[in-house]
Image (cartoon, helix red, strand yellow):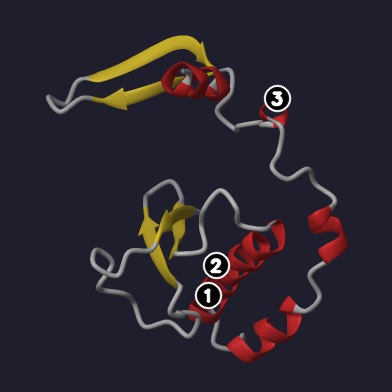
Amino acid sequence: MAFGIYNPEIHKFHQENPYHSDNSKFRIAKYNRKEYKDTQIACNSTLFNENISPVDYARIVYDMFACYLVQEFKKITKELMDSKKNDLDINCITDFDFPAKFENHKYISDNTSIEFTQNDGQTIKKNEPMVIADIYKNRYAQ
């Protein structure tokens, strides 16, 4: 999943999609590799900012998945997905701390090494454990 701030000056071209609105645009990208299939669901929205409510965020994430399902499966319609959206458990969504305390952040890549390819094609592997919270603090600490 990818999230971005929608800017109509930059984001001018979009796939045909029933979930588009004036505030949010969705994009589905599929990649077929030998080992696995990969799908990226992206949303650019003017609603993404530090003050977005947990409920609004959950509804956008729901729309992202609904957008994918409607596009991929003929029997799944926007009307069906919209009717199921009313079943979101708002109490559960609002029970989480908002904003979340930084100490509670967990990232899938915490304590893993990373591998990347440079422009010259050389693959480099960093073996030291990476902790996203530490990288964030080092970059944005004042």
Q: Which residue is depicted at the point 46% across and 80% down?
A: 21
Q: Is residue 10 left or right of residue 98?
A: left
The residue identified by callout 1 is: 67
Asked if the residues shown at circle 1 and circle 2 are in contact, with their CB atoms under 8 angstroms apart, the answer is yes
Q: Which residue is depicted at the point 66% across and 31% down?
A: 106
Q: Position of residue 133 (x, y in %)?
A: 57, 23
Label 1 residue SS: helix
Q: Position of residue 126 (x, y in %)?
A: 39, 13
Q: Quick check: can you spot residue 106?
A: yes
Disc 3 packing (10 Å; few <14; some 14–19; many ≥20):
few
Label 2 residue SS: helix
How far apart are the two marked residues, 2 and 3, measured between alpha carbons?
28 Å
Disc 1 packing (10 Å; few <14; some 14–19; many ≥20):
many
Q: Is residue 76 above or below residue 43?
A: below
The residue identified by callout 2 is: 64
How far apart are the two marked residues, 1 and 3, measured between alpha carbons?
33 Å
Disc 2 packing (10 Å; few <14; some 14–19; many ≥20):
many
Check the image and name the residue furthest to the top: 128
Q: Which residue is depicted at the point 58% across and 72% down?
A: 63
The residue type indicated by label 1 comes to: Cys
The residue identified by callout 3 is: 103
Quick one: label 1 or label 3, which is nearer the N terminus?
A: 1
Which is more toward the observer, 112 or 2? 2
Q: Is residue 93 above or below residue 138?
A: below
| Figure disc tally | 3
